[in-house]
Amino acid sequence: MKILAIETSCDDTAIAVLEIRKQPSGEQAAKLEILSNIVSSQVKLHAQYGGVYPFMAKREHQKNLPLVFKQAMKKIGNKKIDAVAVTYGPGLEPCLWQGINFANDLSKKLDIPIFSVNHVESHLLANFIDGSSTAIKFPAIGLVVSGGHTQLILMKKFLDYKILGETRDDAAGECFDKVARILGLGYPGGPAIAKLARNDGGRASNKLPRPMIHQKNYDFSFSGLKTAVLYEFRKQTPETQKSKQYIQAMCAEVQQAIIDVLLAKTKKAVRDYGAKTVILGGGVVSNDELRKQFKKAFNVLVMMPAKKFCTDNAVMTAITAYFHLQKGGKPRKNIEAKADLTL
Ligand code: KG4
Ligand code: ZN
């Protein structure tokens, strides 16, 4: 079967087509092939304003969706689609509705079932885009770190989730973006900070706070870290503020502060729940330093998606719909309203 998936939760208009071929012997896992994977980024538009304005993003989705759909269909030679999957949340509401309405129309027009997909879950299941979920051992601790979310999740079995903790204010990716804005580095901030941090020449120190790192819960808070950077930056002379050395050191410090907190809380959850796997997802997981330090920090299996599947894409939306379908998940006639947005 072919699933066409649509993802418009933030500023990427993404459509993917995934083909699932059952193997002749029922024993073997089905074969999955990505027939098309298009991510039409709005970064250039939002970079001018230093962040995403939901109604501007909505307008772009409205404009892009028919074009990206046409491109996807052309790529697969206009072959028949068997089901449509769409991100229903969480995300920016005006943006989500563009994708949902487009998917609803498509489902009606082609008379095919429609599946709704949770965006946070899809970031975790991006680890299984090759169709094989057998490597994961339970219990597992999931960590989703994106522009909108920072959540620690307990998975006792496949597709079973309990949120242990989350950010009380800004998400980790949001902190990268806001700090980049303070330092004049543009949007999106994560990749810009990561690039400059690589060249800090080892000057990073520990002067920035690691919010909530010693607290006994699994929650996060990143807005204080951003404020600490702002006060630090304001204390400097205009020359220092523009100095490459200072900016590079600040980037390395803020990146390390974020990684330290994410690592400490994940380690605590792994210990407390006797986890056998750490499974990561979300745009911030494309950060090389984070990837390196997470791989080193645990003596249990650490899974992370390929970098291109960490940031928003619709292949992860399709695979999530597929796994639920496999477990007996039922399609919906029409997505009328956003259902419960928690996992
Ligand atoms: O998952 P994602 O594409 O969208 C949301 O669901 O939010 O994540 C986007 C976030 C942005 O905040 C961006 O700055 C951050 O991921 N990001 C990074 C890197 N690449 C993207 N953060 C740190 N280092 C990176 N290399
Ligand atoms: Zn996302």
Image (cartoon, grey):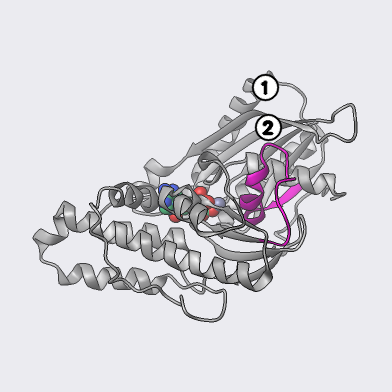
Q: CA distance from mark 2 to mark 1?
A: 8 Å
Q: Quadrant of the C terminus?
A: bottom right
Instruction: Give the mark nearest the N terminus, 2 or 1.
Output: 2
Q: Which residue is mark 1?
A: 76
40 within the magenta span = no
- Between 19 and 8, the one nearer to me in the picture: 19
Vertical arrangement, residue 78 with respect to residue 108, above or below:
above
Q: Is residue 52 visible?
A: no
Vertical arrangement, residue 233 with respect to residue 79, above or below:
below
Q: Quadrant of residue 338?
A: bottom right
The kind of residue tagged 2 is Val
Residue 240 drawn at (x, y percent): 12, 61
Left or right position of 38 against 255: right
Residue at 77% of width from left, 46% of height from top?
323
Residue at 73% of width from left, 50% of height from top?
116
Q: Secondary structure at mark 1?
A: loop
Q: Secondary structure at mark 2?
A: strand
- The answer to whether the residue labelled 2 contacts the one labelled 1, judged by CB atoms less than 8 Å apart, is yes
- Between 66 and 127, the one nearer to me in the picture: 127
Q: Is residue 138 visible?
A: yes
- Between 240 and 110, the one nearer to me in the picture: 240
Residue 138 drawn at (x, y percent): 73, 59
Start and end of the magenta stretch?
A: 115-140
The kind of residue tagged 1 is Ile
Q: Which residue is mark 2?
A: 17
Q: Quadrant of the N terminus?
A: top right
